[in-house]
Amino acid sequence: MAEPPPSPDDSDFPARIAPGCRDPGELDAQVARCRACPRLVAWREEVARTKRAAFQDWEYWGRPVPGFGPPDAALAVVGLAPAAHGGNRTGRMFTGDASGDILFAALHAVGLASRPDSTHRGDGLKLRGVRVTAPVHCAPPQNKPTPAERDSCRPWLASELELLSPTLRAVVVLGAFGWQAVLPVLSDAGWQLPRPRPVFAHGAQVTLPGREERPELHLLGCYHPSQRNTFTGRLTLPMLIDVLRHAAEISGLDQ
């Protein structure tokens, strides 16, 4: 008897489903079905039910948030996880929250976004050569996924970067959490990482040698555009623009 297909509630759903996805569109559809992490499922759905007062008229997405951007992106931007009242509300990465306000303003300034803001899925925003994603696709309580939740979600990120690999030239990682999540994904995919493994820092850049028929890959670090970082001046819009402009140049997107 054939083994039954995995349920979205199974803890190994990402690990069993993600590697078989043939393109980012199929991957995005499967990501949105995932219920592998009970704590995250309960939280995202509770937030979607109770809502924030300012968004009482919204029908919250309340599901895992897929990546956003073209399937042949040369640049990937990797964050942390959707915000409870941002991506968890709108259904699009970095959309509807303060972090997204500065990120999309910077992408627009560099010529990689069609508009400087991202408010909802139907706002007409289009990205040029860039895909925005995260190592955890569900909004976590206190914006803090557990290591187990990060590891459970890892196959989605691994498959997304693998599907992008024919055109991918650079990855900008926003924050230490994303950096720590991306390194093992790249290592498992066969990219040769330096020893010791590179440490996250704003402005860090690591060039990974090409493998087989794939060109070299550039990994860049940038502080996460969280309100804490932007309010304290740790990350400013010009700083983020500088990182993204450099990433666009080495990805061939500055034409």
Image: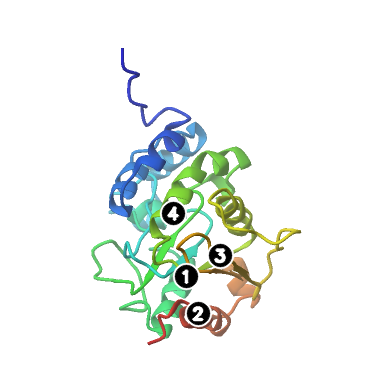
Q: Which residue is mark 1?
A: 169
Task: Say the numbered circle drawn on residue 250.
Answer: 2
- Left or right of 226 in this view: 196: right
Which of the marked residues, 2 or 3, is nearer the chain's N terminus?
3
Label 3, label 1: how many angstroms apart (C-alpha)? 13 Å
Specify few, some or many for label 2: CA neighbours under 10 Å numbering under 14, 14-19, or 20 or more: some
Residue type for callout 4? Glu
Circle 1 crowding by C-alpha within 10 Å: few under 14, some 14–19, many from 20? many
Q: Are marks 4 and 2 in contact (CB under 8 Å)?
A: no
Q: Amino acid at mark 2?
A: Ile
- First in sequence: mark 1 vs mark 2: 1
Report how far apart the C-alphas of labels 4 and 2 lie in the structure: 19 Å
Give the structural element (helix, strand or loop) at label 4: helix
Q: Amino acid at mark 3?
A: Val
Badge 3: residue crowd in 10 Å (few <14, some 14–19, many ≥20): many
Q: Residues within 10 Å of mark 4 (few under 14, many from 20)?
A: some
Closest to the observer, 98 or 166 = 166
For the C terminus, the image quarter is bottom left
Q: Position of residue 224 (x, y in %)?
A: 58, 66
Residue identified by numbered label 4: 162
Look at 28% across and 61% down and name the residue there: 121
Q: Which numbered disc, 4 or 1, marks the residue that appears first in the sequence?
A: 4
